[in-house]
Amino acid sequence: MKLLPDPDPVPLRGGPVLRWGILAPGVIANKFVRSLKRHTDQEVAAVGSRSRERAKSFGQRFSIPRAYGSYEELLGDDSVDIVYIASPHSFHKDMAVASLEAGKHVLVEKPLATSALEAQVIIDSARNHNRFVMEAMHTRFHPRTRVLKKLLEENELGYIRMVTADLGAIFPVDHSSRIYDPALGGGALLDIGVYSVWFAVFVMGSPTRVQCVGELTPTGVDGQSIAVLTNKSGQHAITSCSLYTFGPGEASVNGSRGRVLIPSRHPAPGDLALYDHRNELVAEYVDRSGLLTAEDGLCRQAVWAARHISDGLTESPMHPLSMSKLVLQVLDEAREQLGVVPTGF
C-alpha cells in the first residue's frame, strides 16, 4: 500500500494578508476567528453586531481592536478589506449586498443564500461592484479534497457510477432555536445537507433529476431527508442528512476501476482511502497538516480568499459562484419536494 501525496500543499502563513471584519459574532464566527488566530497571519481588524455589548465581548475575547454596535458602522470602516458574514442564512443576501455596496470583499458562511434566486442577487451585486465574493465551503479547501480532485482528473477510479454522502447530528428539539426556525432558513438541508449535496455535485456535476424524501419538523423545516441525484450520463448520488441522529458521516466515490472512501465527518479535514476494482486497499492519503478538526480547517478558506483577491480575482476558481448557485438549485428542488415553505425569493 502506498501513501498519496497532497498534490498542491498550501502554506497558511507567509502569503497575502487581508484585514477582516466579522459580521454577526455567533458560534461559527467564534470558530472562524479562533482558527485564523491560531493558524494564519490574517488580521481580524473589527467586529460588528446589532448589540454593542456583544461586539465588545467578542472583540475582547479575540483581541480585536474595533467593535461596532451595528453592521453599518463596520461597513463604514475603511480599514476593513473583507467581511466574513456569519449570520443566520436568511440574512446572507441582504448583508452580502450591503457589504459589496460598501466596497468590501465578502466571504459568506455556507450556504451562500437560502435559494438560488437569492444567490443570483449576490452574484449580480459582486459583478456590478467588481468585488470578490465566495461561499465559505471550507471542505473544498482541505488537502484531501485536492487529492480526490487529482484522482478524478487522472481517472484513477474509472467511470464513476455512484456517489454517496451522509451527514447528521443531534440538535436538541428547541422550536425557538435558529435550526428549527423557518424564518431564519432552518432545517437540515441548508445547514448540514449542503455539504453532502456539494460533494455529490463536485464529483459528478449538475444533476438533471432530484428525488427527495423525508419529513418536516412541527415548525415546518426539514428534519431529515434522503435525496437521489441523477445526471445526464446516468450517474447517481445518494445524499442524506438529519437533525435527529448521527449517521456514519461518510462519503464515497465509486467507479469501474476503484473507489474512494472518506471516513466519518466527510466535510472536515482528514484522511482518504483508495480501493481498487477488487475492493482491496491500495493507497491512502494521511493528513499530516495538524489541522484535523472542522474548526481548525476553517482558516484555509480565508487564506485562499486572500490569495484570490491578491491575484485580482472576483471569485474563486476552486469554488466558483456558479457552484454555490447550482448546489442551491438542488436544495431548492429537494426542499420543495419535502414541502418546505420558502423564506426567501
Image (cartoon, rainbow, N blue to C red):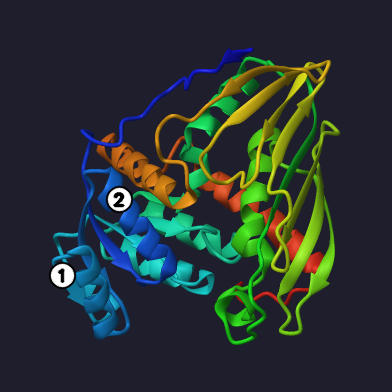
The image's mark for residue 238 is: none
Front one among 244 and 211 = 244
> Does residue 203 appear anywhere in the picture?
yes
Front one among 220 and 36 = 36
The residue depicted at 75 percent of the width and 74 percent of the height is: 340
Please give left or right for residue 326 compared with residue 46 in the image.
right
The residue depicted at 24 percent of the width and 84 percent of the height is: 52
Front one among 46 and 101 = 46
Please name the residue that numbered disc 2 is placed on.
36
Residue 184, position as x, y percentages in the image: 56, 77
Please give left or right for residue 230 compared with residue 114 in the image.
right
For residue 255, above or below residue 307: above
Secondary structure type for disc 1: strand
Amino acid type assigned to the residue bearing label 2 in the image: Leu
Secondary structure type for disc 2: helix
The residue depicted at 65 percent of the width and 39 percent of the height is: 263
**How many circles with numbers are drawn on the protein?**
2
Q: Quadrant of residue 82?
A: bottom left
Residue 299, position as x, y percentages in the image: 36, 47
Q: Quadrant of residue 99?
A: bottom left
- Alpha-carbon neighbours of circle 2 within 10 Å: few (<14), some, or many (≥20)? many
Q: Residue furthest bottom?
A: 176
Nearer the viewer's eye, disc 2 or disc 1? 2
Residue 339, position as x, y percentages in the image: 80, 73
Q: Quadrant of the N terminus?
A: top right
Q: Of the residues under marks 2 and 1, which one precedes in the sequence?
A: 2
The image's mark for residue 66 is: 1
Tell me the CA gap for discs 2 and 1.
Answer: 17 Å
> Does residue 328 appear anywhere in the picture?
no
Residue 221, position as x, y percentages in the image: 71, 75
